[in-house]
Amino acid sequence: MAQLTWTYVGDNGKHYNVGLFHGPNTGHLMVHCNQQVVLIDFNVLESKSYPLFIDDELFELIIDNTKGQFSYGFEINKKADTPRNRFRKKIEKKHWRQTLIFFAILLAIGTVFCGFVLFYNSSQKDKNLAPLLETQGVETVARVDKIGGSSSGPQLQISFVADTHAKQGKHLLIGSSEAYTPEGFSIHEGDEFIIKYLPQDPSVFELQIQQPSNRQLEIYREKAMEKHMELHPEVTAPTALCLLEIAYELKGLGGIADFYNQDQSSGENEVSNELTYKRLIRDVPFKQESSKRCSY
């Protein structure tokens, strides 16, 4: 005679003692709960299961016959469609949602932290490299080979010669949606700028985008002169050149950019445009120098 007992503690703390008597030869089965008979069956000689409710929890009494050997189990059925299981699934779904939100918050915090660490390391690296470039850097001319884009702004692919070896690199124009120099000149493939690099490691460099090469400076001057004479046909070449020289003396490369972009609005070019050009030529120092040095 097989005799087994299981104990289940309900949500209210009440104990339920479930007992089983099974004759493996006769197959007669009796199940009781807290001394009360809840199930009787006869000739149970094969594997079989019985559903039993205790409070509102559904259990499965399992009788398994494997090669004439009986084994018994008493398990909660969490898959059947019962009010208790529906409530359980609702709670589990809520817990899963809370778990996902928790891990999403952790992931967001981790991403922000990693981004901060990378940014901090990058900024520290830049701070450490700046003195080295200042004291040990070597200057040469870099050429813009290609202009691409990235999520952070335009990206220039450049090439230069370091110790007789051709080198390549990239320079990101942060904070700009278009490829412009700080003075407002649009950057094109083939433009040249001064670059400073470490001779012991040419991969460490700084492109001086605000400092064009002598050749590039002459190109800017010629373009600005052509644009000024095109917009002012009455002005002779010597006069235009004189005006540009004064603009360069007073405002540097930005003065040449003002002449070159004098037909653009502030919406087209925020740095150098019609307004900055008029402000330059109407300024007292410019008017005084142009009246003394330039013939009209």
Image (cartoon, rainbow, N blue to C red):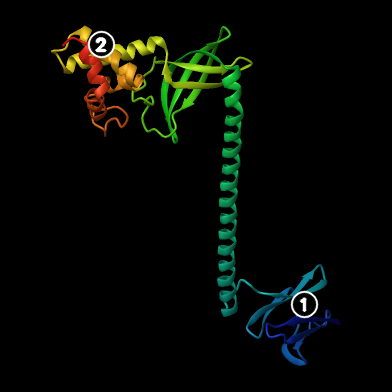
The answer to whether 173 is drawn above or below residue 188 in the figure is below
The answer to whether 40 is drawn above or below residue 166 in the figure is below
Left/right of residue 202 with respect to residue 268 in the rendered view? right
Task: Tell me the number on the disc at residue 136.
Answer: none
In the picture, residue 7 is in which quadrant?
bottom right
Q: Nearer the viewer, residue 175 or 182?
A: 182
Please provide percent x and percent y for residue 293: 23, 10
In the picture, residue 198 is in which quadrant?
top right
Please provide percent x and percent y for residue 79: 61, 71
In the picture, residue 53 is in which quadrant?
bottom right
**What's the residue type where badge 1 is placed?**
Leu
Outermost residue toward the right?
1
Of the image marks 2 and 1, the number of the one nearer the N terminus: 1
Nearest to the eye among marks 2 and 1: give it.
Answer: 2
The residue to which callout 1 is attached is: 45
Please provide percent x and percent y for residue 168: 52, 17
Outermost residue toward the bottom?
36
Please provide percent x and percent y for residue 19: 79, 85
Tag 2 near tag 1, CB within 8 Å? no
Q: Secondary structure at mark 1?
A: loop
**Quadrant where the N terminus lies?**
bottom right
Residue at left offset 60%, top offset 17%:
136
Q: Secondary structure at mark 2?
A: helix
Label 1, residues with CA under 10 Å away: few <14, some 14-19, many ≥20: some
The residue to which callout 2 is attached is: 242
